[in-house]
């Protein structure tokens, strides 16, 4: 019973709640900033697009596959991209120029009937060196509640960049529900 009394006393002082919320917001934002270390994406940089790239085409296993993305991995740098998925879920085309890879990537991600536009971002390390590029589809937002349905994250393991692609949880949940409803 005494615990409830402490909570009630806390609620009697709205200033304390306000300060507690500010402290919580500051702590949450500082953790978010710390997560930017390591390999992540940034807005497309006008960097060096020369060289040879490997194009990784992820997903696209059927006509309206939402889990579809493409990655341009620069050959000859310290990192190789490793897709965290079964081998049948992606394929790699080696030895392309940036322009050739980008053309094939944008064509690949645009096959869904709800496709609206694509988004290209630079994949960079903690020293802001461009390791490659991410090309992902953005869909018509009224179909799925958002235009960006993918969560893509990168983990550094030695000289590999492990790429993980998943549908956002609320999209996955609604997709599963729709699949069950259609039976």
Image: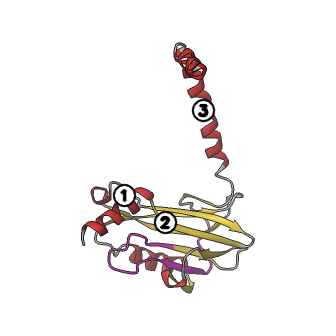
Point out residue 40 in the picture as x, y percentages from the top left corner.
Answer: 61, 59
Looking at the image, which is closer to me, 126 or 130?
A: 126
Q: How crowded is mark 3: few (under 14 residues within 10 Å), some or many (20 or more)?
A: few
Q: Which residue is drawn at 60% across and 39% down?
A: 28
Looking at the image, which is closer to me, 88 or 60?
A: 88
Q: Residues within 10 Å of mark 2 (few under 14, many from 20)?
A: some
Residue 160 drawn above or below residue 44: below
Label 3, on which residue?
Answer: 24
Main secondary structure found in the magenta portion? loop
Whichever of labels 1 and 2 marks the residue nearer the N terminus, that label is: 1
Point out residue 19 in the picture as x, y percentages from the top left corner.
Answer: 59, 22
Q: In what quadrant of the picture does the C terminus appear? A: bottom left
Point out residue 10 in the picture as x, y percentages from the top left corner.
Answer: 57, 18
In this view, which residue lies farthest toward the left? 182
Whichever of labels 2 and 3 marks the residue nearer the N terminus, that label is: 3
* The label number, if any, that marks residue 147 in the structure image: 1
Label 2, on which residue?
Answer: 166
Secondary structure category for the residue under label 3: helix
Rounded to the nearest angstrom, the CA distance separating label 2 from label 3 is 29 Å
Whichever of labels 1 and 3 marks the residue nearer the N terminus, that label is: 3
């Amino acid at each position: 019973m005494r615990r409830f009394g402490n909570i009630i006393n806390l609620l009697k002082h709205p200033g304390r709640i306000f300060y507690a919320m500010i402290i919580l917001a500051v702590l949450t934002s500082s953790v978010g900033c710390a997560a930017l270390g390591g390999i992540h994406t940034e807005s497309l940089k006008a960097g060096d697009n020369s060289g040879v790239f490997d194009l990784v085409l992820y997903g696209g296993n059927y006509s309206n596959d939402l889990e579809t993305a493409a990655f341009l991995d620069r050959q000859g740098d310290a990192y190789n991209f490793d897709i965290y998925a079964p081998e049948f879920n992606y394929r790699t085309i080696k030895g392309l120029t940036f322009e050739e890879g980008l053309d094939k990537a944008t064509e690949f991600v645009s096959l869904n009937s709800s496709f609206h536009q694509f988004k290209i971002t630079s994949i960079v390390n903690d020293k802001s060196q461009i390791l490659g590029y991410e090309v992902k589809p953005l869909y018509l937002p009224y179909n799925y509640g958002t235009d960006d349905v993918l969560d893509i994250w990168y983990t550094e393991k030695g000289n590999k960049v492990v790429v993980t692609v998943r549908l956002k949880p609320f999209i996955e949940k609604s997709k599963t529900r729709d699949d069950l409803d259609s039976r």
